[in-house]
Amino acid sequence: MLLALTCGFALSQAFRTVAAIMAPPLQKEFGLTPSQLGVFAGAFHLAFGGLQLFMGMGIDVWGPRRTVLAVSPLAIVGALLAATAHDYGQLLMAQVVIGIGCAPAFLVCTVFIARWFAPERFASVSGATLGLGTVGLLLTGTPLAWLIEQSSWRAGFIALAVAAAAAWLAIFVLVRDPKLPPAEAAAAPANPLAALRGYGELFRLPFTWGILVLGLFTYASFLTLRGLWLGPLLVERHGFSLVQTGNVALAFSVISAFGAPLYGRLDPGERRRRAWLLRYTLGMAALFAVMAAARSVLVDVGIGAVLSLVSGYMVLQYADVRSAYPPRMIGRAMALFTMALFMGVALMQWLTGLAASHAAALGLETYAAVLGGIALMLAAAALAFRWLPAPAGTR
């Protein structure tokens, strides 16, 4: 059942990273500016992140299976809408529809794991799920680049629509919702309005704010590189072809498949986990800063490979959420955290698009501005996480 749900998550990974490979042909066909490209990539994540609270409500009231089956067909519709796009406006609309369709994809996995598996296994099983989900990133590496070069970027969206339909069918046939223990079933919200009121309780807990601030920028940093700027960076900064860029993206995706399972196994537990999160976030900021300054193909590809592996530490953020809140709040807590992750991706992709557009006026190389901006945002998020309140017993 978890494998079937992970298929849906893998397709959402593919959809959220298509911009890295499709950026050059889209720029050529529609004459997109870097700022427009950032908005195009961010539109998916804005829709995806903005719907997380409602997905959490749906999961708490109706269960993971019915929620994902009801919403995910929109990803198929959006992909077909993108494949037939005749202007930039339709592309944006398609990205929004795809983002809504993918909104429950990983959230249903995390809630399913929280309900079916023992708490001490949450980090390792979540890490394995994230690792398997990187199959979606593999699809948007060499395979997508080859398909675009052989046909067109429109064929890429059609192929993803077919794959999304197959994932929906697998979930429909294989997945059932777990039966909650009587105490948890009694505490579950009876309707969406009751679930919505439960979010207020989350915001009244002071440590929620530190969790959300860090969540806004960690995953966003890796996905902004892999899902948006990797293609333009390699093509424009280093003269790579589209297939060569796809090969690098594929390599990064293979490496990232090992990161989340690795860190899920290495989870140091509640007392040390937040210190790990702080140090790794600052380390990521430093690596982005080196990429911004070096302008070397070996540095960019080498550090990109390191980031692909090290970014797996972000699975510890889900474990941090799992341990910070009581079981009756897990569905909504996961939804709120996931919303922060993907609203952060939309924010960072938009901001880096602005940085790229204004780099020349500031006397900066385009990708120095993009990568340096990511480094600054990560460093600021790490410092905020350090100084905002933490759950009892974790600091």
Image (tube, rainbow, N blue to C red):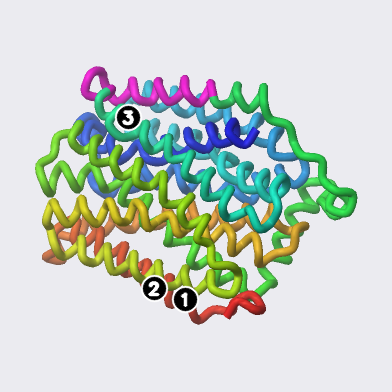
For the residues marked 3 and 1, what is the alpha-carbon distance in whole angstroms? 41 Å
374 to the left or right of 67: left
18 to the left or right of 164: left
Look at the image and say whether residue 160 sits in the magenta stretch.
Answer: yes
- Label 3 close to label 2 by CB (< 8 Å): no
* Residue 15 visible in the current orientation: no
What residue sits right under mark 1 in the picture?
384
Q: Nearer the viewer, residue 281 or 86?
A: 281
* Residue 293 visible in the current orientation: yes
- In the image, which disc is placed on residue 380? 2
Please report the residue visible at 65 percent of the width from the left and 46 percent of the height from the top. 113
Pointer 2: residues within 10 angstroms few (<14), some, or many (20+)?
A: some
Q: Nearer the viewer, residue 357 or 106?
A: 106
What residue sits right under mark 3 in the picture?
87
User: What's the amino acid at mark 1?
Assistant: Ala
Task: Report x, y in % for residue 179.
Answer: 81, 40
Quarter of the image with the N terminus is top right
Q: Secondary structure at mark 1?
A: helix
Residue furthest front as drawn? 265
Number of callouts? 3
237 to the left or right of 162: left
For the residues marked 3 and 2, what is the alpha-carbon distance in whole angstroms? 37 Å
Please report the residue visible at 32 percent of the width from the left and 69 percent of the height from the top. 376
Look at the image and say whether residue 113 sits in the magenta stretch.
Answer: no
Pointer 3: residues within 10 angstroms few (<14), some, or many (20+)?
A: few
Task: Report x, y in % for residue 377.
Answer: 36, 67
For the residues marked 2 and 1, what is the alpha-carbon distance in whole angstroms? 6 Å
Mark closer to the chain start, 3 or 2: 3
Mark closer to the chain start, 3 or 1: 3
